[in-house]
Amino acid sequence: MVTGGGLDLDFLPDRALDIGHLTFRGVPIPWISAVDFVSPHQFETEGTEWLRTFSGGMLATCGLDTFGPASEDTGKWYPMHGRVGALPSTVVETSLDQGVLTVRGEVHQAKVFGENLVLRRTYTAVLGGSTLHIRDTVTNESSTDAGHMMLYHFNLGWPLLDESAVLEIPSKTTTPRDERAIAGLESWQTIEPPQLGFSEQVYFHEAHPGNGLAVVDNPNLDLRLEIQFSTQTLPGLFHWKMADYGHYVMGLEPSNTHHVHGHQTAREASVLPILLPGESVEYEIDLVFSGSHHKN
């Protein structure tokens, strides 16, 4: 999709219609991993083997029934970050109508005698504009209740991400995931340069009611990205901070639950979102690109 307003991006039909490369005014925005964009047929479900096909990219969707580490629950295996990102989409519309660009597709996560979850995804952008709107609807089309966990793994990299950039996440609370995150809590918003041996830190930001927001603003590039999301169905955001050599990336990840430890523990803690038979939930996110608000 090329909007004519500086926004140029690639969709991945074989990967849940996720977003791969994206540039704004010619500047690359996402982090692309050393894996690059490999075939989803190489997807592995054991342990952390999800990382062998984790390409990064602008958006890697996690779900539809789990995210976080792999787990086994009531005899069913839930791989790390779920299966949806390795499932193909059916593209049902690409259009330009009255100045609005639209790309729409469907993704089915189903198993005989198991779950039947359908993701209906729509991207829209105004011709000449620099905002990408994402509207997703997930429907439980089975005859039984379905656990549903959803996380939008936006992966930002250099040159947008560097020590001159400013991170803004207005939130009610900020909760570290583990001991490493606790150690870095006082500087969670600082964007450091790459450093050898950096250990990843993860924080959960509980959003204020209404519209959630996460911003990376780079005055040296005169470039600002705002991730805006509806807290009605995405109540918070995970912040993945990784500043190691070769893995210089920040994940800003709106989610439908604050629980990041997999399906089993979410169910045991009674925080697993449930979709009843025939029930749907809608998610809305805007990626808004503009000039910096912190110009030098």
Image (tube, rainbow, N blue to C red):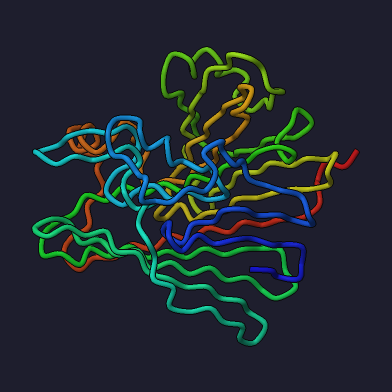
**Where residue 195 sits in the image (x, y, percent)?**
66, 17
Image quarter of the C terminus:
top right
Residue occupying the far bottom of the picture: 98
Residue at position x 74%, y 56% from top? 24
Where residue 291 appears, x then y in whole percent?
Answer: 81, 52
Left of 29 or right of it: where is 85? left
Q: Quadrant of the N terminus?
A: bottom right
Residue 272 falls in image quadrant: top left
- Locate residue 12, reporting x and y percent: 50, 60
Residue for point 75% across, 73% down: 128
Give the quarter of the image for residue 277: bottom left
Residue at the outermost right position: 296
At horizontal 17% and vertical 33% (from top left) the residue drawn is 268
Does 85 sit left or right of 250 as displayed? left
Give the image location of residue 42, x and y in percent.
Answer: 37, 45
Q: Which one is nearer the viewer's eye here, 186 or 202?
A: 202
Q: Residue at x 69, y 69 (%)?
A: 2
